[in-house]
Image (cartoon, grey):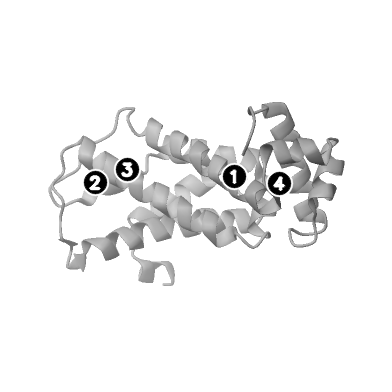
Amino acid sequence: MAGKRNTKTEAKIKAAFTTLAQSKGFDAMTVSDIARTAGINRGTFYMHYIDKFDLRQQLIDDTIDDLTRILIDNSDEGGQSVTSDGRAICDAFKEDSIAKALHYVKDDFAFFDAISHSGNDMQLYDRLKAVLKRLIIAQAQRFGAEPKTNYNGIPADYAMEILVSAVSSIIWLWIRRGCKETPEQICRIIETNKTTAPIDVLW
């Protein structure tokens, strides 16, 4: 992106992208469509983005940056040390931090809905998982937890994948269902999931 950032212009472009992604789809929209809907000329668009693909990527990058700040920065407020067997590692997902992240998503639901139908939905999902992994690692390092090779017989990398995939999938399903539940309700589901074996959900 060239030129000085203009948040007002970028906000208009993001709003136009969101509207067009929902009304005609990402593949069908053009830069001219985006500029016209945003009330700017094509030259102004190109001062900020290379093309519509660059726009989509930068919007995703900005969103991940925001979610990272919400989750990682808030993880330093209080917290619980991690036990030697790693059970308290789940407390890296502090309920208030998750709630703030979910409110961020709900407040900008139109954009998340647009992205989830733009062909890049799995990138956002995978990057959300990466943020959650960073959160767990940051909490463990903060409290001086020793790295472990396995948890209850499960290799550490698989254990990490199980944990972050569960939380990410709950959040992603919530988005795909239209954020019908409140962030607080989703937080309760995530909290319950921490102590519920997968098989117990079905019986």
- Foreground mark, 1 or 4, reads 1
Marks 2 and 3, Cα distance to the nearest angstrom?
8 Å
Q: Amino acid at mark 3?
A: Ala
Asked which secondary structure carries label 4, the reply is helix
Q: Amino acid at mark 1?
A: Gln
Marks 1 and 2, Cα distance to the nearest angstrom?
35 Å
Residues at badges 1 and 2 in contact (C-beta under 8 Å)?
Answer: no
Q: Which residue is mark 3?
A: 92
Asked if 145 appears above or below 76 in the picture, the reply is: below
Q: Amino acid at mark 2?
A: Ala
Point out the image quarter for the N terminus. Answer: top right
Horizontal arrangement in the rendering, residue 66 relative to residue 78 (left or right): right
Where does the image place residue 116, in percent across and percent down from the top left? Answer: 64, 57
Residues at badges 2 and 3 in contact (C-beta under 8 Å)?
Answer: no
Give residue 58's mark: 1
Asked which secondary structure carries label 2, the reply is helix
Horizontal arrangement in the rendering, residue 2 relative to residue 133 (left or right): right
Q: Which residue is mark 4?
A: 110
Give residue 32's mark: none
Which mark is first along the chain, 4 or 1?
1
